[in-house]
Amino acid sequence: MVRRRTAVSIAAAGLLLAAPALTACGSGPAHPGAAAVVGDHRITVSSLETAVNDLRSAAVKSPQGQQLLDAAGNLSTQMLGRLVADQVLQQALSDARISVSNGEVQQDRQAALAQFSGNEAQLNSTLLVNYGVAPNDIDHFFYRDVASGKLIQSLGYQPGSDGGNTALAQTISKAAASLGVTVNPRYGAWDAKKATIATLKDPWVVDKTPVAAAVTTGNSGT
């Protein structure tokens, strides 16, 4: 059995939802065809639906896929929160003048793959079931991982440290405040105090273990 471990890097997928003091707009004004607007960037309904369908299709094909779907609740709202977080992360990277190369992303992915003795199918299955990452989003998952780690280091902390996670959350908060977030009422209302859409929480909750060390096969079962 693969032991579930979470990763600081999914902060890019869920950190925005965990940040304590974002300043953002609610659910208006209307933006036709948009699921959300982050600054000047429109997250379209069609792009959201594509992301949801990709994840749902991958889950259906997985033996443990129903576990993911059951945990996700309102999958569209959860996925929208992730897409919003991605945009805010990009702003935080820009503000800090940090870039992430494809080489860094692939190195991070290979480090995680090594935890599975090179078994890519097993790694992909773990990312899907434990973290809600569809196969075509895997490289971006590791992009988030590298980006989060570099942001933490730029703030003077080690990735995975409590102080680093707190500083990262504050940095993300500032980026979100400068951008502004507006959510289509169809998916809920943006709650700036809770930093989430409506009252839902991201089902792929994160802790502070870097992904390359966190994604392991473990020895806790067969």
Image (cartoon, grey):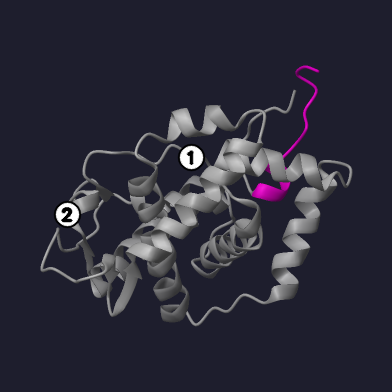
Q: Dot 1: within a 10 Å radius of its alpha carbon, few (fewer than 14), some, or many (20 or more) residues?
A: many
Whole-percent x, y for residue 93 in the image: 47, 74
Look at the image and tell me in which quarter the N terminus lies.
top right
Quick one: which residue is furthest to the right in this view?
A: 117
Residue sitting at 83 percent across and 41 percent down? 116
Bounds of the magenta span?
211-222
User: Where is mark 2, residue-wise?
Assistant: 185
Whole-percent x, y for residue 72 in the image: 43, 36
- Nearer the observer, 113 or 76: 76
Q: Main secondary structure of the magenta part?
A: loop
Q: Is residue 192 visible?
A: no
Q: Is residue 103 visible?
A: yes
Look at the image and tell me in which quarter the C terminus lies.
top right
Three-letter code for the amino acid on which mark 1 is drawn: Trp
Whole-percent x, y for residue 33 in the image: 26, 69
Three-letter code for the amino acid on which mark 2 is drawn: Pro
Q: Which mark is residue 204?
A: 1
Q: Earlier in the sequence, mark 2 or mark 1?
A: 2
In the structure shown, which secondary structural element does the residue marked by tag 1 occupy? Answer: loop
Whole-percent x, y for residue 125 in the image: 70, 40
Quick one: which residue is furthest to the left in this view?
A: 29
Dot in front, 2 or 1: 2
Q: Is residue 11 above or below residue 43?
A: above
Quadrant position of residue 104: bottom right
